[in-house]
Amino acid sequence: MSGAETGQGSSRRQPSLIDLFREEARAQAQILSDGLLALERAPRDPVTLEACMRAAHSLKGAARIVGVPDGVSLAHVMEDCFVGAQQGRVSVDAGMIDVLLSGVDLILKIGQGSGDESLSQTDVDAFVDALNARMNGATVATSALVLDVPQSGADLDLSNELTLSAPVVEQAASDQARSTEVREPARMLRVRADTLDRLLSHSGESLVESRWLKPFAHSMLRVKRIQRDASRALDFLHESLTEAAASATGSSAGFLAPTATAALDARTLDALDEVRRLNAEAHRQLGERLAELENYDRRSTHLSQQLYDEALECRMRPFVDATGGFARMVRDVARSLDKQVRFVIAGEATEVDRDILDLLDAPLGHLLRNAVDHGIEAPSLRRALGKPPEGTITLEARHSAGSLFISVSDDGGGVDLDALRRAIVRKRLANETTAARLSDAELLEFLFLPGFSMRDTVTDVSGRGVGLDAVQDVVRQVRGNLRVTQEALGGTRFLMQLPLTLSVIRSLIVEVDGEPYGLPLAHVTRTLVLPRASIDLLEGHQHFAFEGRRLGIVTAHQILRSGSFETARDTLNVVVIGQGATCYGVVVDRFLGERMLVVQPLDKRLGKIPNIAAGALMENGDPLLIADLDDWLRAVEKLVVDGELGRVSSGMTSVVAASRKRVLVVDDSLTVRELERKLLAGRGYDVTVAVDGMDGWNAVRSEHFNLVISDIDMPRLDGIELVTLIRRDPQLRETPVMIVSYKDRAEDRQRGLDAGADYYLAKGSFHDQTLLDAVRDLIGEAQS
């Protein structure tokens, strides 16, 4: 019975043991592969030789236990080789490493569970004979030992037609030595991926729910303030009745005071005393409960955040988990092309989302092959250019500014831009005049076009015209972007900017037709507040100037087919999305800020919803939709092609409205807000209301107002702080501000004026006409 048959039978008898053996075979094969690559640079390194010998010895014992004789044979002869190298009897040169790596490929076949289909006794015998011959000093051709074992990125064609003169990077010897060290493995548990996904979803919802407590606590503070005002009213009533009773007693001197009236006054005062006592007790109890609520809010939010962070950590894996086969792949491609390449990995411990990591294998493998094939020059050419004969390719992962950055760079000669221009003209992607005017960055963008190749012939590594476009598609699939840069004779660098996780996304929150939408920040180039006068009409389309070029502009309402865009403002809130030639400005109603959103995938039964990628919850529990900005770009291009692109101008209605003075009323009291709104609207002013200081600050930053009227005592941001922020903002400092407050003391009035208020009006003393006169004094009549 062959080894494959034995393994198959064992699998039926003890499937758990076979599964464990296959997992161990894959792990030991990785240790052997990394160790052999390290030995190619330091053939006599005792630590690496010991690690490789132990890996082969452990594999031999495991194969013997589960009954896989082919595994025993492979591991035994490899162990003999490493022992011979330790004793100085065997020379571990490049040829020996080639043979040993072919043995690692055979072990991988066993680890992949495919031994019974493709691992033949002939393969095993050929390897054993070849390795024994090498150890005995004979020269053996290794080409027949090379097996078709999948490498990293094998499912992506290697064709990308970059004419990169890029160098190939090697994994640092210290990294390889570290990877071969014998460590005590941490206890591992198998958990289904969908279970982790549900855990993260529930923890995210828990985090959102915990944040609901803070606004609730703020609303309770308003209740406490109302209760305090009621207490003051009771005190005033008690004092008034006491004075009235005393006055009545004094005026009746010499006469008999009515007994019934005196008894009634006494009962009334007693009842008021009891109400005051109960009110004081209620005030004390409310204060204590509020303190408890704040403590609970703090603990609950902290615990929910910890739970979410731990659940998110379960999805994260170190970047090194995706780089296991790259060093071997780079070495094999370099040797096949007769190039000398050094491969360096930086940021191995960088945490990466599991789903992103699984998708990175193919694109990174393709970029590394390109770097070896197109980037690194032949040793003779590098010497002629004054470079070391060995090129360097660096694979780096790092976190920065809330994103994951992964780069593949080399020290080659870079892309031949003249050859790239000729290829662009030859493929009729642009005429010679246009191609001559293209900048270096614009030229490099052509490398990402489907089917683009700079090679006239097809090789085993490249020339088929597919590659970088597939890499870019994968990067876009995870809401990232890909850029390429180079320096003259300094090599080429591909940089991927990716989200830290697919479960959480940094988003710009905007309002469109009264609904909030999340725009992933990775696809947002800039946010602008444009004067309406800066919009020009060119060839039937509206444009605006942006960084030295003209960008088309369209409303988000038309993209989402959600209502019509109407505004009375002289400015437009614009989000610039896209890159390169496909870059547009999108007008939204309001900017609502930036937030981290927990992504909630939409039900698959809904299918693909145009222009929408997923859902999420705001901190207050309100739902919103996360936009698919790639869909938005395609929607704009379709509107342009179909000639349906609408105008940003909002028509005569908005022109009339724009002539009215706009007033923002900021007050946490519904009664006061409505009173002031009705008074001002009745006089012809265009009035907008905000429920507290923070809401007012967001409104005044996103819209133009001729006047701001604000209370002082408000949650989240009080009136004094709001006035201070307005006066510090260079775009808002000239906006008139009026404070309307119950506080009528001289020090309160001076505090408001010192903060920068133009007018201070006490609520207790103002009448309708007083407010209207003050507004007219500050900004004039409602109509311009």
Image (spheres, grey):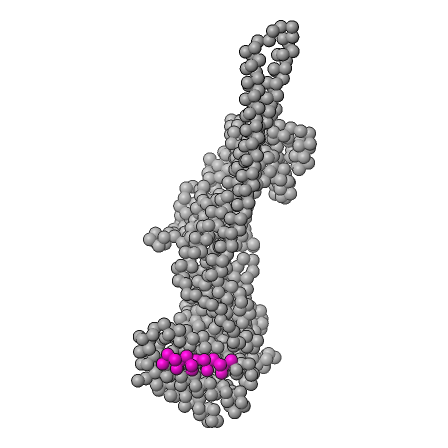
- Can residue 325 be seen by looking at this rendering? yes
583 in relation to 646, above or below: below
What is the span of residues highlighted in magenta in the rendered image?
51-67
Q: Residue at x 55, y 19 (%)?
A: 268
Q: Position of residue 698 (x, y in %)?
A: 55, 42
In the image, what residue occupies the spot 53% across and 40% down? 217
Q: Quadrant of the C terminus?
A: top right
Q: Main secondary structure of the magenta part?
A: helix
Q: Nearer the viewer, residue 725 or 185?
A: 185
Q: Is residue 527 above or below residue 283?
A: below
In which quarter of the view is residue 69 placed?
bottom left
Residue 306 drawn at (x, y percent):
51, 54
Q: Residue at x 46, y 74 (%)?
A: 325
| 734 vs 488: above or below | above
Q: Which quadrant of the figure has residue 662?
A: top right
Q: Please count the marks in the image.
A: 0
Q: In this rendering, does residue 469 appear at all?
A: no
Residue furthest to the top in view is: 255
Nearer to me, 733 or 163:
733
| Point 55% across, 64% down: residue | 398
Rendering coords of residue 561 (x, y %): 40, 45
The quarter of the image holding the N terminus is: bottom left
Q: Is residue 176 magenta?
A: no
User: Vertical placement of 641 versus 740: above or below?
Assistant: below
Residue 659: image x %, image y %?
Answer: 53, 34
